[in-house]
Image: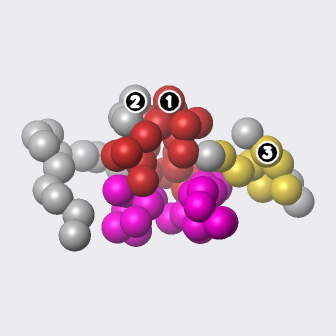
Amino acid sequence: MVSVQGVDLMDVKEVAALLGVTVGRVRQLAQSGAIPAEKVGRDWVFIRAHVEEFARRPRRPGRPSKVQ
């Protein structure tokens, strides 16, 4: 995790570990806008507070729908 101007930033691997999902699923969530993220070059960057907020939201059980 990196901190820039007091904001903790995370990469895809760190988010996947925190949420208990795969790296691919994290990328899908970022691309769909479910988790706010910014693409920097080829990498996604996440603000830790946004990821923690996403983790607290109730989720529906079952397989997620495809992102197109």
Front-lying residue, 13 or 50: 13
Q: Quadrant of residue 41?
A: bottom right
x 43%, y 40%: residue: 23
Circle nearer the N terminus (1, 3)? 3
35 lies above or below 9: below
Residue 33 position by quadrant = bottom left
Query: As rendered, which of 53 and 65 lies closer to the eye?
Result: 65
Q: Which residue is mark 3?
A: 2
Which segment is the magenta one? 28-48
Instruction: Tell whether 68 sits left or right of 57.
Output: left
Would you name the residue on which mark 2 appears?
A: 20
User: Can you say which quadrant of the picture contains the C terminus?
Assistant: bottom left
Q: Is residue 56 visible?
A: no
Q: How is the image coloured?
A: secondary structure
Name the residue located 37 percent from the left edge and 36 percent from the top edge: 22
Per the image, the residue denoted by label 1 is 17
Q: Which element is circle 1 on? A: helix
Q: Are circles 1 and 3 on residues that touch, CB within 8 Å?
A: no
Tell me residue 17's x, y (percent).
Answer: 50, 30
